[in-house]
Image: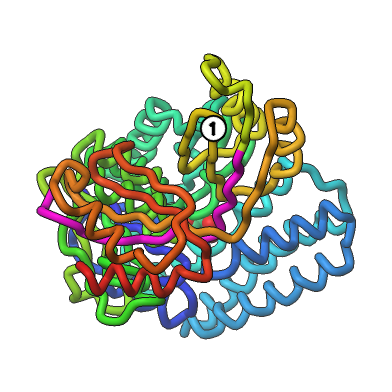
Amino acid sequence: MKVLKFGGTSLETAERMKSVANIINNEEKKIVVLSAMSGTTNILIEITDKLHKKENKEAAEMIKNLELDYLTVVDELYTDLEYKQKGKELINYHFDYISSFTRDLFSIHEERAVLAQGELISTALFHNYLLEHKINSVLLPALNFMRINTNTEPDNYYIEENLKRELKKYSDCNLFITQGYICRNMYGEIDNLKRGGSDYSASLIGAALEVEEIQIWTDISGFHNNDPRYVKNTYPIPYLSFDEAAELAYFGAKILHPSSVFPAKLKDIQVHLKNTLNPSEPGTIIKSGAEGKGIKGVAVKDGITVIKIKSGRMLLAYGFMRKVFEVFESYKTPIDMITTSEIAVSVTIDNKTYLNQIVTELNKYGNVEVNDDMVILCVVGHNIIEQKGYINKVFEALKNFSIRMISFGGSRHNISILINSIDKKNALISLNDLF
Ligand code: ASP
Ligand code: MG
């Protein structure tokens, strides 16, 4: 058994959905995990935003437009009149539900239910397409087996038990379609695995069933050795270890949700990144024992804010760090990088939702300074920090840029450097030229 996950761009149009159907149409036993069609989750978020602000007229307008887009997809996807009609009814049904909140009360629970519609629609449309083409398959509702606990962590035992029970009902079927991203929480309400969470769904399903391979299909041929948006002649890295992949996924390289490496690593299941637009390309294989030599890749994480807390009280004091970290914890804001000196500590975050509140609280402990618009460059390779010369090379490549923070030695496989975002492109090119 394999798990194949297709992201939003792989389902962007009716044509692309048909290509996905071609890719999966073979005898291999598999579970196909789908995201929402590209752009849908973003629009649903905007709609829920409007609903919260009681801008119901604007919300209704957006809902109508999105529904019209889907009706076009239906028209292009199916040939048979019966399926066109079925598709239309399906779209009407989901959009009637979303529209109902322009007339009704809207809470956080309903927000999550609205956000789930993207995946519910894409999987139902796709499954109907398979049925129209007589491809035997079963649509498995992720809401029947995917669950998170009170810490919003996946409930692995529940997932395994319930997924296996669902699959048992269809022992003669080789092809299952299910939704990525969506799940239930401890209270049985509809919830989700956060943005980009479909990769995580695929990995959790793969781990629960201990499958042979987890494939993540996107619109790029695997992890590139540098950012192809800014650097010419980048190439896909053929093999990565789980640790290297986790570092690259976490720092930039949007291709894979960082959490999704962990379940696969635990069960030692290889993860294969493939390109829907170019299925014959080898892509990137993430597996144990794939450690190579030297620097494997460079990724960049945008939208970083650095916060410096300077305090005389830190001198020779214990407990200072804890207090600082507790502030971030209480606002559920993860810290990416940390550097310390005897009188100051600097940390970076990429989620500014609670920045004002955090700064207000940190002011109790010292002088706080905030700098926006930074990026983290992340240089990854097996054991690069223990091998001589790599850090010198990194500094050599970056000698013309001002460096705000460096993280070296946190993990053996990564060197992270914080620079101004205006230097991003040239710094990436410079690193690429050097390696
Ligand atoms: N549709 C969700 C999102 O856009 C989940 C995913 O695509 O992985 O975040
Ligand atoms: Mg994604």
Residue 76 versus residue 319 in the image, above or below:
below
Q: Is any part of residue 349 visible from this angle? A: yes
Counting the numbered discs, the total is 1
Find residue 418 and report its horizontal and vertical position in percent.
45, 54
Which one is in front, 201 or 415? 415
Residue type for callout 1: Thr
Q: Nearer the viewer, residue 75 or 86?
A: 75
Q: Which residues are magenta?
A: 291-308
Q: Where does residue 237 sit, x and y in percent of width and height? A: 20, 64
Question: Which residue in the protein does label 1 denote?
Answer: 152
Which quadrant of the rendered structure holds the C terminus? bottom left
Q: Position of residue 273 (x, y in %)?
A: 27, 61
Our reading of the magenta stretch's main secondary structure is strand
Is 298 within the magenta?
yes
What residue appears at the point 33 percent right and 35 percent down from the top-left corner?
A: 164
Identify which residue, 77 or 171, lies in the foreground: 77
For residue 16, above or below residue 353: below
Q: What residue is rendered at 31% in x and 61% in y? A: 298
Query: In the figure, is residue 108 to the left or right of 122?
Result: right
Picture quadrant where residue 85 is located: bottom right
Q: Is residue 187 magenta?
A: no
Query: Is 273 on the left or on the right of 140, as rendered?
Result: left
Question: Which residue appears at 40% of the width and 74% of the height?
Answer: 426
